[in-house]
Amino acid sequence: DAGVIQSPRHEVTEMGQEVTLRCKPISGHDYLFWYRQTMMRGLELLIYFNNNVPIDDSGMPEDRFSAKMPNASFSTLKIQPSEPRDSAVYFCASTERGQGAGELFFGEGSRLTVL
Amino acid sequence: GNSVTQMEGPVTLSEEAFLTINCTYTATGYPSLFWYVQYPGEGLQLLLKATKADDKGSNKGFEATYRKETTSFHLEKGSVQVSDSAVYFCALEDRGSTLGRLYFGRGTQLTVWP
């Protein structure tokens, strides 16, 4: 079975540009999470969805960040405009209620560098 | 609130050495506890878990015991291999909150030399 698929794997952009990260969760999973990983702050939960509905976006750092989940098989995280401090690895993860406690399935991440 | 504190790295060991990575937690409710592992260039993957006090999670030679009295979940392995080199994350899930909503520690980098 395919795991969580993220794209792009690497993105280098200039400050002020729009960045869109994409995620395809595991089929049948009804929870989707976006995490950000930096050396300074470790892993931070940005937002999560249940059945395509955003449940908690309190981790989204600023209004420059937005996330959508138009259907059960696709989610995007958008940064507009991007800033150098947004440089990080962004992970998408999914799970389902029938799965064991706390077992998230992570994608390989999107490494973002903002110059 | 909920939080996880794990020992700072990096940890460097020779092959076949004994490994301990300390993890303590603070939780508002009765959490489930986890260790995740991240190999270079990959996403995190679940290594082991324990859902109630005194439970021992184990996988691939790694073990951790849920100690409610000391609020700890230390990761151990009796004999590490070069292939165990990775970053290890301790995490908790508060059962009163959303399924899969995990609180992670900062991660501990482990390097094993042959």
Image: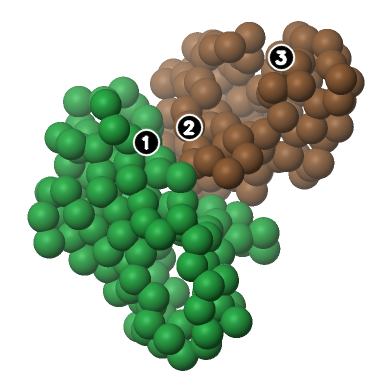
Amino acid residing under circle 1: Phe
**Crowd class of label 1 (few under 14; some 14 to 19; many from 20; radius 10 Å):** many
Name the mark nearer the viewer: 3 or 2. 2
Q: Is residue A83 above or below residue B2?
A: below
Distance CA(mark 2)–CA(mark 1): 7 Å
| B88 left or right of A79 in image | right
Q: Residue at x 13, y 49 (%)?
A: A72
Q: Which mark is residue B45?
A: 2
Task: Report helix, strand or loop for mark 2.
Answer: strand
Task: Report helix, strand or loop for mark 1.
Answer: strand
Q: What residue sits right under mark 3 in the picture?
A: B77
| Quadrant the C terminus of chain B occupies | top right
Residue A82 shows in this picture: yes
Q: Which mark is residue B110?
A: none
| A45 left or right of A97 in image | right
Quarter where residue B80 is shown:
top right
Residues at discs 2 and 1 in contact (Cβ within 8 Å): yes
Q: Are marks 3 and 2 on the same chain?
A: yes
Of all chains in the rendering, the one displayed in green is A
Amino acid residing under circle 2: Gln
Q: Residue at x 25, y 44 (%)?
A: A25
- Chain for disc number 3: B
Distance CA(mark 1)–CA(mark 3): 24 Å
- Chain for disc number 1: A
Q: What residue sits right under mark 1 in the picture?
A: A105
**Crowd class of label 3 (few under 14; some 14 to 19; many from 20; radius 10 Å):** many
Distance CA(mark 3)–CA(mark 2): 18 Å
Of all chains in the rendering, the one displayed in brown is B
Mark 3 or mark 2, earlier in chain: 2
Task: Report helix, strand or loop for mark 3.
Answer: strand
Q: Position of residue B2 (x, y in %)?
A: 49, 47
